[in-house]
Amino acid sequence: MTKRETKKQITQILSSGYNHQSSEEEQSMLTMLLKDGVDFRELFTYERLAEYNLAPQPLRSFKNTVICLVAVVCRIAVKLGAYSDECFALADHYIFKVEEMKTIDEVCELAAMVMEQYAQIVKEKREKNYSLPVLRSIRYINRHLFGVIRIKDIADEIGIHPNYLSTLFKAELGMPLTQYIRTAKLKETKELLLFSKYSVGEISEMLGYSNSSHFAREFKKEYGCAPSEFAAAQMTQI
């Protein structure tokens, strides 16, 4: 193919409506890999993946989209400190795997699986690099989700100053300690709404919220809907 023919083909592709992940979407994926409790199956839906029109035939377009996703998320994971050999080997595995998919639903499921796998790799790598105080803080939070969690209580348990703990936590996890506590509690809220018969008010009280309205606002801020709406939506899918 000559240079002129190549340029013509590129022009045709750019004018055809084909789309790729933007730099903003890549930044969004980076954030997803760093955040605990992300439900990738809710994010990488048919509707979202259909936005990337990468081939005339629908199944081929979805496969190409996931191949692009694999390439992008692999690069991001390496940038976040994951081992490059492991990331690239996993990328090769998923690129071969996507070609085995027979339906668009299978391809969408694979997209979520790709993100979950790389998120786990990034998490494990980052946790290996956490200092002992941060690791002990995370363990403390996980043990005390059902109740009020104060930074001072965590710091007293570990034996360091609260301000130093907050600074250390932010430096290593990229988020304030208070945000991590809130996210952990809201993740537990989703589990309780899905797998228990407790009411929203009972869950709010169990998790140490003194104000149920504040609890509902925090949940909506995190997940885009009120806890009662989330619970109702799950019931309709049963």
Image (cartoon, rainbow, N blue to C red):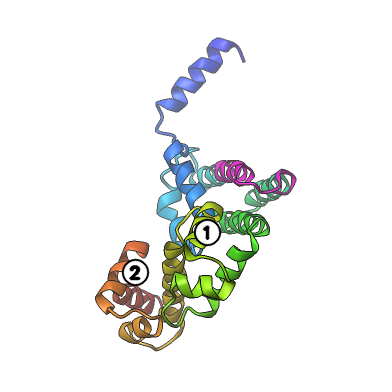
Q: Nearer the viewer, residue 207 or 140?
A: 140
Give yes or no for residue 88 being in the magenta stretch.
no
| Residue at image coords 51%, 59% | 164
| Pointer 2 residue | 219
Q: Position of residue 168 (x, y in %)?
A: 54, 57
Give the amino acid type for the residue marked by disc 2 in the picture. Answer: Phe
Looking at the rendering, which quadrant does residue 1 occupy? Answer: top right
Q: Position of residue 49 (x, y in %)?
A: 46, 49
Which residue sits at x=49%, y=38%?
54
Above/below status of 1 relative to 180: above
**Residue 37 in the image, given as x and y percentages of width and height:** 49, 65
In this rendering, position of residue 209 left or right of residue 90: left
Find the distance from the CA under tag 1 to the CA under tag 2.
23 Å
At label 1, counting other C-alpha atoms closer than 10 Å, the crowd grade (few under 14, some 14-19, many 20 or more) is: many
* Left/right of residue 125 with respect to residue 231 in the rendered view: right
Mark 2, residues whose alpha carbon is within 10 Å: few (<14), some, or many (≥20)?
A: many
User: Looking at the picture, which amino acid does disc 1 mark?
Assistant: Phe
- State whether residue 22 appears in this view: no
Task: Say whether residue 221 is visible.
Answer: yes
Residue 14 location, quadrant:
top left
Residue 169 tag number: 1
Q: How many marks?
A: 2
Check residue 71 for magenta coloring.
yes
- Magenta residues span 67-86
Q: Are marks 1 and 2 in contact (CB under 8 Å)?
A: no
